[in-house]
Amino acid sequence: MFCCNNSFFNLNRTCVTDCTSTCGPTVVMTCSDCCTRVCSRVTYTVTITNPATCTIECAALHCRLAPSFCFNRGTVTVNGTANVDATPECISLGTIAPGATVTVTYVVTVMECKRYNKSQACLSGLVCCCCESKRLVIPSNVSVLQVCCCCGGSSTTCLLYTSPSP
């Protein structure tokens, strides 16, 4: 899925920046809890860093939610600014400048007791490499949220649950 209108860009234009050797954006997904329970709200944060010398144009974030999650409409923020019409399937980020960091947050509600819930994000956009525009697709890490069906579930419980005994 690429939610930007490619006709906006002249893909045959001449570029002056060649970032072939320095392109390396990172996409990191985290969640507010590592262990929770059904009906809880969880905030996901996706941090995109562009350490390259080239701009990422027409950037969009695509977040795949675990099937047992329900997205809470109106909760998407991009760099702290609300984007009430956005959905995790396609969050438009515009242009990401060299050296910039973009932070996206959204909230989901856990709807069913499925033990391990995996979510992942993917950044798409256009970069100028070798003097031509190329599509860039960078996946994030896989974020796993544990839903505890037998207890209250909390970050503290999760930490005790996963830490080795002294």
Image (cartoon, grey):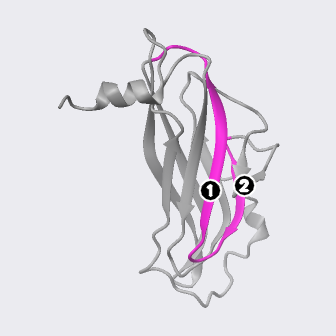
Residues under numbered marks 1 and 2 in contact, where contact means CB atoms less than 8 Å apart: yes
Viewer-side residue, 143 vs 126: 143
- In the rendering, which numbered label is found on residue 145? none
Q: Is 10 situated above or below 161?
A: below
Q: Which residue, as the protein is rendered here, is positioned at the far bottom?
A: 16
In the image, farthest residue toward the front: 166
Image-quadrant location for residue 159: top left
The boundaries of the magenta stretch are 88-114
Question: Front-most of 146 and 69?
Answer: 146
Q: To which residue does mark 2 refer?
A: 80
**Residue 35 found in image quarter:** top left
Circle 1 crowding by C-alpha within 10 Å: few under 14, some 14–19, many from 20: some
Q: Amino acid at mark 2?
A: Gly
**In percent of the image, x 46 and y 30: which residue is there?**
155
Q: Nearer the viewer, residue 75 or 139?
A: 75
> Which residue is found at the position 61% from the left and 91% from the top?
16
Q: Which residue is mark 1?
A: 103
Q: Distance of mark 1 from mark 2, alpha carbons?
A: 8 Å
